[in-house]
Amino acid sequence: MVSEFLGQLTLSHGGGEEPKFPTVVPVRDFDPAKDAARIDTAIKTKGVDEQTIIDILTRRSCDQRREIAFEYERVAKKDLNTALKGALSGPLEALMLGLMKSTTQYDASELKASMKGLGTDEETLIEIVCSRSNEELLEIKRVYKDLFKKELDKDVAGDTSGDFAKLLLALVQSLYEAGVKRKGTDVATWISIMSQRSVPHLQKVFERYKSYSPYDMKESIRKEVKGDLEKSFFTLVECFENRQLYFANRLSEAMKSKGAKEKVVTRIMVSRCEVDLMKIRTEFKRQHRRSLYQTIAEHTKGDYQKALLSLCGGDD
């Protein structure tokens, strides 16, 4: 049982590219010049034709959107991001601007935004750092440095404190080291790296981890740690068990919470639509007995809703 469980953990957080389950794929017979011209017209239309912008940008792959942006700038003589900012507002604007970045650029800028200004948005930090695979984190660190001319670890260290900071740094740094030296980090290495970082709680929890079921693991975490550290551990354990189910549950909570947490919904839909949103949809239906599509339709509205439904890619 234990070795089996640890084996599964290694699989889900191990090396190699994970297979992709996107809802957004490259469109066939792609014509970037035509798309750019249609977007230009939609933006210039009195009152803005949001539907056309949504139809195009949510049904093109990231590389295709980049080509559209290139063509748009050539024709309209201005930057597409700037034009979208001027034409759209609110959650729809945030979603569309998110789509104009690559998945990794988007993750990196969401991390940066979570550490900007007064107070750190720990929830976002935890969601991104604890749910991304080694390979994704490696890429995020590289892109973060390109975009912001700063090291991600240094920013995290400057913005968090205590054991929570140690945990996030252990993840950002050690996965990096383990990930570079050889493909995939088995759980034992991971645990030993963590405990070498002398996070006392971690040693206790992970020592027991070896003989615990996922459920008991959560119970033991509950007893040992509180606050952000507890949330981080839970996220790690949940993502170890089933990453797509973690995202499905997070989407469900965000949409059902009072004052639907649009930021969370947008972030998951944008960052996963070319990665594993199809599988998140499957887990959502299995867990919540309703499709993600129906839940979005019920809890969001207007053009923002149309964009989310389009990214969702269909009902189940």
Image (cartoon, rainbow, N blue to C red):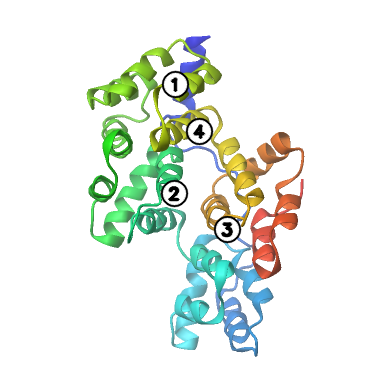
Residue at 31% x, 40% y is 172
Q: Spatial distance from mark 3 to mark 4, Cα to Cα?
A: 22 Å
Q: Element at badge 1?
A: helix
Q: Amino acid at mark 1?
A: Lys
Say whether residue 159 is left or right of residue 8.
Answer: left
* 130 or 27, nearer to the observer: 130
Q: Where is 314 relative to 183, above or below?
A: below
Q: Counting residues from the N terminus, which is met first, the one under dot 4 or under dot 2?
A: 2
Q: Amino acid at mark 2?
A: Thr
Which quadrant would the C terminus be assigned to in this image?
top right
97 left or right of 171 in image: right
Q: Secondary structure at mark 2?
A: helix
Q: x, y (%) of residue 261?
A: 57, 55
Measuring from the top left, give residue 86's x and y in whole percent: 50, 82
Q: Which residue is mark 2?
A: 124
Say the numbered circle drawn on residue 239. Answer: 4
Q: Which mark is residue 223?
A: 1
Where residue 47 sits, quadrant-wise, is: bottom right
Q: Tell us which disc is closer to us: 2 or 1.
A: 1
Relative to 67, does residue 297 appear above or below in the rendering? above
